[in-house]
């Protein structure tokens, strides 16, 4: 569950995007050095790892076979770690390193046995064996295109120095024609323009071929574990929201039941008793019966007023019809403590968000009127980039808490059920500041 600070903080850091040409040149440089360095590294990796592995397997029946096999595993892990660092700039992000299995028990035997039983070590070894295939293809493409681009564009500067004896043939002659020197310069220049014009895409494709092969073997298991962890975290958040919604609903029903029992139900009982007494008085004392009926009518009006108040607590019509600003304005007007309301006009939000924001303010103002002894309360509703921020602050006695058993616990459940966060800052004698961040 995110904190209020994380939902209200905006990123103040901004960077200027590089010019397109500079970005292309930088990308070509990164991809080229990645491919050119990958070819010798691939040779070294396959020689070392394959030699150690097969020597270890061949001598596994002897006591020194397991250390050699473990050395092959640790060597492939070292090359895999270096490769993860190398492919980071190609993808433009830092690649996460996997969690390798730790020895279950202390001792050299378990340290040698652990890499043999860890799947990530085997993926590293598999990459060490087969990385030479994509690195060779990528190396051939990059060298060919760089040679074609540089050689073709500069052939006119050094082509005259090439021997041109009767047995020598260059590319134009191999293609079936023998032009003069100027035509040859134009031919090689056109070839150089072709290679230079397609250099970015060829180099990028070659680098991605090699880098994607490494990413699948070296990082896919880590990405899968991360996705599972994210899914589990999302499921836990959903379960917490569901539990909070159930708790908030149960709290609201208990409060409504208590309010009906203590208010309208008692008045209706008294109304029934008054009407029964008036019925008995009509025959003997009509004047007293009329007074009793008048009192019953007064009780009926008060009961209707209480029922209207309760209905506003369930679903205030003004919120549905006119929106959050009008509902908060009416709410502030009924509060017995002066309210400084800052709620600008905004577009209609989702009904769940508007309802939650309304009940946050309503419950907070009720607590202020009942318990805070405050002389003023400030209510602020702001729409920010990450959601809706609702703040209620008073200058009362403080001491409010979100702990279970306090009046704000049910409100916290309601906010969490909407996917938001509720925070309370209420030192003793220092007033109370209630902040709710609701996602949109």
Image (tube, rainbow, N blue to C red):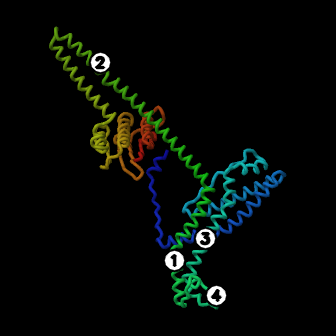
71, above or below 228, in the image:
below
Distance between mark 1 and mark 4 Cα atoms: 25 Å
Judging from the image, what secondary structure is the residue with disc 2 in? Answer: helix
Q: Which residue is mark 2?
A: 269
Which numbered dot is residue 194? 1
Residue nearer the viewer, 166 or 88: 166
Q: Disc 2 vs disc 1: Cβ atoms closer than 8 Å? A: no
N-term mark: 4 or 3: 3
Q: Could you say where residue 34 lies in the image, as x and y percent from the top left? A: 61, 68
Distance between mark 2 and mark 3 Cα atoms: 89 Å
Residue at the image position 46 percent from the left and 57 percent from the top: 11
Which numbered dot is residue 168? 4
Q: Nearer the viewer, mark 1 or mark 3?
A: 1
Distance between mark 4 and mark 3 Cα atoms: 35 Å
Residue 370 as seen in the image, left or right of residue 114: left
N-term mark: 4 or 2: 4
Judging from the image, what secondary structure is the residue with disc 4 in? Answer: loop
Which numbered dot is residue 33? 3
């Amino acid at each position: 569950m995110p904190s209020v600070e994380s939902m209200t903080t905006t990123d103040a850091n901004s960077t200027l995007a590089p010019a397109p040409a500079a970005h292309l040149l930088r990308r070509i440089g990164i991809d080229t050095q990645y491919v050119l360095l990958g070819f010798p590294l691939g040779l070294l990796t396959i020689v070392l790892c394959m030699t150690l592995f097969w020597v270890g397997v061949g001598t596994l029946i002897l006591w020194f076979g397991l250390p050699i096999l473990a050395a092959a595993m640790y060597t492939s892990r070292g090359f895999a770690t270096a490769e993860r660092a190398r492919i980071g700039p190609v993808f433009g992000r830092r690649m996460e390193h996997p969690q390798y299995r730790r020895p279950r028990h202390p001792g050299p035997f378990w340290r040698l046995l652990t890499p043999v039983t860890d799947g990530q070590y085997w993926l590293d070894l598999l990459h060490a064996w087969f990385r030479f295939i994509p690195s060779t293809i990528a190396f051939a493409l990059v060298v060919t295109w760089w040679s074609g681009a540089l050689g073709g564009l500069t052939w006119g500067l050094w082509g005259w120095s090439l021997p041109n004896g009767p047995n020598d043939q260059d590319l134009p002659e191999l293609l079936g024609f023998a032009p003069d020197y100027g035509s040859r310069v134009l031919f090689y220049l056109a070839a150089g323009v072709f290679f230079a014009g397609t250099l970015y895409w060829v180099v990028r494709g070659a680098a991605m071929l090699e880098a994607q092969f490494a990413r699948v073997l070296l990082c896919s298991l880590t990405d899968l574990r991360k996705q599972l962890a994210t899914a589990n975290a999302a499921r836990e958040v959903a379960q917490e929201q569901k539990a909070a919604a159930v708790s908030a609903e149960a709290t609201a029903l208990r409060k409504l039941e208590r309010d009906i029992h203590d208010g309208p139900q008692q008045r209706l009982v008294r109304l029934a008793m008054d009407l029964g007494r008036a019925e008995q008085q009509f025959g003997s004392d009509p004047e007293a019966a009329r007074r009793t009926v008048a009192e019953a009518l007064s009780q009926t009006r008060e009961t209707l007023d209480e029922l209207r108040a309760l209905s506003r607590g369930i679903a205030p019509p003004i919120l549905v019809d006119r929106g959050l600003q009008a509902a908060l304005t009416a709410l502030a007007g009924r509060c017995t403590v002066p309210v400084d309301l800052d709620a600008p006009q905004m577009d209609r939000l989702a009904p769940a968000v508007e309802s939650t924001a309304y009940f946050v303010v309503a419950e907070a103002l009720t607590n202020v009127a009942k318990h805070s002894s405050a002389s003023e309360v400030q209510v602020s509703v702001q729409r920010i980039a990450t959601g809706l921020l609702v703040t209620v602050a008073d200058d009362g006695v403080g001491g409010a808490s979100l702990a279970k058993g306090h009046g704000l616990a049910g409100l916290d459940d309601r906010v969490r059920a909407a996917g938001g966060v509720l925070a309370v800052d209420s030192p003793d004698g220092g007033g109370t500041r209630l902040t709710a961040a609701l996602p949109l």
